[in-house]
Image (spheres, helix red, strand yellow):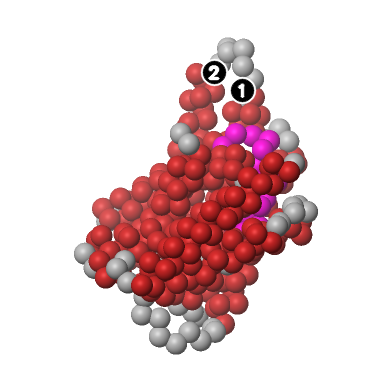
């Protein structure tokens, strides 16, 4: 399938994770929900690896990285994925802590800065040259995403809260996570990389969940708990992690980060569809925001193509 189609599939799945995670609030704490997503996905991925190893047994192709022994054969790879997963878990925990003293609107606005942060991290650490055209594209993307957010919510007065500092640091960790995948994620395939992220993510989350996850309050017997958990596990954890690994390698971190600008649009479309409140989409602010987003995405994609021609 065309990688750009997969890119927007990834963005839509990411948008759905915000909606479904909100539904999980009545069944489990955010930390417990995150741990369950990782641990259930890890179990499914382990089964896939064993099944694939059994099917390729005796084959002439090199399937060493499909075995658990092969995946753990490189101490350097283990350290890399320990840090990749740690940055992702740090983002989740920071978001939960931030929401104790700020609002979802504030975090949504700050989240639009993640692509710009990713560009800055890649510039400083990976020494990636970034044209002014690309920087302008990311700035326009942030502006467009903010316009979409403000046009679909009753914003009121935005006042800087203590939690906003925490979430700002969390966004840096998320940007770092994407750049780390680009730098270190090429040694193994997308499926194996997703497995490693879930494995080390589960290890990071285990002590945090035991201490602060309020497992005694989880509604284990509720059907809604399991239906939402399975959706989060299969579609917004397994699929998104695998797609992210593949897309970062094939398209680069910049394009993946740019696609995050569309997440507020997909969330607004979902809310409008489920509530039949089409006024969310039929206003000048939303239309202008989407228009600016399209211009930003074109500019970022065009600059990436020009960079490849130069190199």
| Residue drawn at 59 percent across, 66 percent down | 139
Q: In this view, does 74 lie above or below 258?
A: above
Residue linked to disc 2: 56
Find numbered disc 2 in the image and state the secondary structure of the residue it sits on: loop
Disc 1 from disc 2: Cα separation? 7 Å
Pinpoint residue 309: horizontal percent, then vertical percent: 69, 41
Q: Is the magenta stretch mostly helix, strand or loop?
A: helix
The quarter of the image holding the C terminus is top right
Whole-percent x and y of residue 58? Answer: 58, 12
Who's the residue at 53% across and 55% down the image? Answer: 297
Instruction: Work out whether 213 lies above or below 298.
Output: below
Task: Answer whether labels 1 and 2 touch (C-beta < 8 Å).
Answer: yes
Disc on res. 63: 1
Is-magenta flag for residue 181? yes
In this view, 102 is above or below 76: below
**Could you tell me residue 209's position as x and y percent?**
51, 60
- Res 113 visible: yes
Camera-side residue: 147 or 270?
Answer: 147
Mark with earlier residue (1, 2): 2
Q: Is residue 101 magenta?
A: no
Q: Which residue is drawn at 68% across and 35% down?
A: 187
Which residues fall within the magenta stretch?
173-190
Which element type, helix, strand or loop, lies under badge 1?
A: loop
């Amino acid at each position: 399938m065309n990688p750009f189609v997969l890119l927007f599939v990834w963005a839509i799945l990411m948008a759905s994770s915000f909606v479904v995670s909100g539904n999980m609030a009545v069944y489990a704490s955010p930390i417990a929900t995150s741990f369950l997503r990782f641990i259930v996905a890890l179990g499914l991925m382990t089964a896939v690896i064993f099944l694939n190893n059994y099917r390729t047994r005796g084959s002439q192709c090199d399937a060493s990285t499909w075995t658990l022994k092969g995946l753990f054969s490189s101490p350097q790879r283990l350290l890399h994925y320990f840090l990749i997963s740690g940055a992702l878990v740090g983002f989740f925990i920071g978001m939960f802590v931030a929401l104790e003293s700020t609002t979802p609107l504030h975090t949504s606005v700050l989240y639009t800065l993640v692509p710009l942060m990713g560009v800055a991290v890649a510039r400083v650490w990976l020494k990636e040259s970034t044209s002014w055209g690309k920087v302008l594209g990311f700035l326009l993307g942030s502006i467009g995403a903010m316009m979409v957010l403000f046009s679909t919510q009753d914003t009121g007065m935005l006042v800087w809260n203590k939690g906003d500092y925490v979430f700002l640091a969390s966004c840096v960790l998320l940007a770092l996570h994407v750049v780390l995948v680009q730098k270190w994620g090429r040694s193994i395939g997308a499926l194996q990389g997703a497995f490693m992220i879930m494995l080390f993510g589960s290890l990071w989350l285990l002590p945090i969940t035991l201490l602060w996850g309020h497992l005694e309050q989880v509604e284990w017997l509720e059907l809604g708990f399991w239906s939402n958990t399975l959706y989060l596990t299969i579609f917004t954890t397994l699929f998104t992690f695998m797609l992210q690994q593949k897309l970062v390698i094939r398209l680069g971190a910049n394009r993946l980060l740019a696609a995050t600008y569309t997440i507020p649009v997909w969330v607004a479309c979902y809310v409008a569809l489920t509530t039949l409140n089409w006024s969310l989409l039929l206003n000048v602010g939303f239309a202008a925001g989407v228009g600016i987003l399209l211009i930003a995405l074109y500019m970022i994609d065009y600059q990436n193509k020009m960079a490849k021609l130069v190199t």
